[in-house]
Image (cartoon, helix red, strand yellow):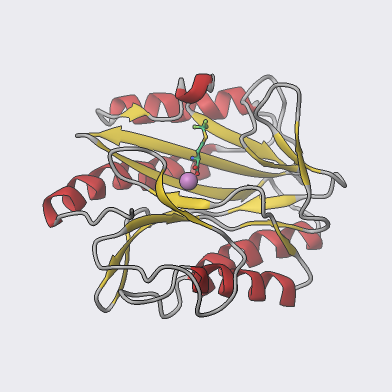
């Protein structure tokens, strides 16, 4: 069952999502070579707390940090630690804020200094995949049209789509129904309704889409060690389009 949120609930989500948006902008201004991924997490923790919200990720199934900080071949769920960011890295920062009973969720991939042309294109195309995914999206759109559009754009650009992780509904819980895959067949899946709130989060790789999880139980890396990128927003389905809450 995909929940339909009332305007009052959406107003609260708008607030949680604005914190996510502003926190990502705050990180963008500060992230740089020489910083550790743990220091990025500290920025996120302090920003979210100072905004009167809670970092939803901290303690989620035992997750030990406020943000997922995923460098290069790490696809998602990189645990912040003493790893030092270097010029040429691409770093995805994924975070959730909980306030007034609702979660917001968003992710960006940042370039550290000058990156290779391949990584540069990967980051650009991953963002574009999100915007392709929401093209024409509105009440009545079949759910898997999103994945169809994301996959088409990624593959046309020579990249592959991670299958092992998906987007998701969001609201009072960080992960609600439905699962929102980034691959799919056009015209299939449940028809979305006005008031559904979902996170659309393409995870795109330069090489294989196959991943493995490291022994820490979280860190997902590409099997071939080639780079991956991630871009995510929380969106409300409307009668005539979408409202993006984390932009
Ligand atoms: N923010 C992630 C998502 O997009 C979830 C992170 S998992 C956690 O769904 F354990 F870090 F919380
Ligand atoms: Co998410």
Write down the quadrant of residue 86 in the picture: top right
Q: Is residue 104 positioned above or below 129 on the image? A: above
Q: Does 234 sit left or right of 92 as displayed?
A: left
Q: Does 152 sit left or right of 54 as displayed?
A: right
Q: At 65% from the left edge and 32% from the top edge, which residue is drawn? A: 78
- Which residue, as the protein is rendered here, is positioned at the far left? 8
Give the camera-side residue of 9 and 247: 9
Q: Is residue 198 positioned above or below 97 on the image? A: below
Q: Does 62 sit left or right of 156 as displayed?
A: left
Q: Position of residue 197 (x, y in %)?
A: 32, 56
Q: At 81% from the left edge and 56% from the top edge, which residue is drawn? A: 116
Q: At 61% from the left edge and 25% from the top edge, which residue is drawn? A: 80
Q: Position of residue 199 (x, y in %)?
A: 43, 53
Q: How many numbered badges does the structure rendering display?
A: 0
Q: Is residue 11 positioned above or below 64 on the image? A: below
Q: Position of residue 185 (x, y in %)?
A: 59, 75
Tell me the quadrant of the picture where the C terminus can be found.
bottom left
Give the camera-side residue of 68 and 62: 62
Q: Position of residue 135 (x, y in %)?
A: 45, 77
Q: At 38% from the left edge and 55% from the top edge, which residue is drawn? A: 198
Q: Is residue 13 positioned above or below 120 on the image? A: above
């Amino acid at each position: 069952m995909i929940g339909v949120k009332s305007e009052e609930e959406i107003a609260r989500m708008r607030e949680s999502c604005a914190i996510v948006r502003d926190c990502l902008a705050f990180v963008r201004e500060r992230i740089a070579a020489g910083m550790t991924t743990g220091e990025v997490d500290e920025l996120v923790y302090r920003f979210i707390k100072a905004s009167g919200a809670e970092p939803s990720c901290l303690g989620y199934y035992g997750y030990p940090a406020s943000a997922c900080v995923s460098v290069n071949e790490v696809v998602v769920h990189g645990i912040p630690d003493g790893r030092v960011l270097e010029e040429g890295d691409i770093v995805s920062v994924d975070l959730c804020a909980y306030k007034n009973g609702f979660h917001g969720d968003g992710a960006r991939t940042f370039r550290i200094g000058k990156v290779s042309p391949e990584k540069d294109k990967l980051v650009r195309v991953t963002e574009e995949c999100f915007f392709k995914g929401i093209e024409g999206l509105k009440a009545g759109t079949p759910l898997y049209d999103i994945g169809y559009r994301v996959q088409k754009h990624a593959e046309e650009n020579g990249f592959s789509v991670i299958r092992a992780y998906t987007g998701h509904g969001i609201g009072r819980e960080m992960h609600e129904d439905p699962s929102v895959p980034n691959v799919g067949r056009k015209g299939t899946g449940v028809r979305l309704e006005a008031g559904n709130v979902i996170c659309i989060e393409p995870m795109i790789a330069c090489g294989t889409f196959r991943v493995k999880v490291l022994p820490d139980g979280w860190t997902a890396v590409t099997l071939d060690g080639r780079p991956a990128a991630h871009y995510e927003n929380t969106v409300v389905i409307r009668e005539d389009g979408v409202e993006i809450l984390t932009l």
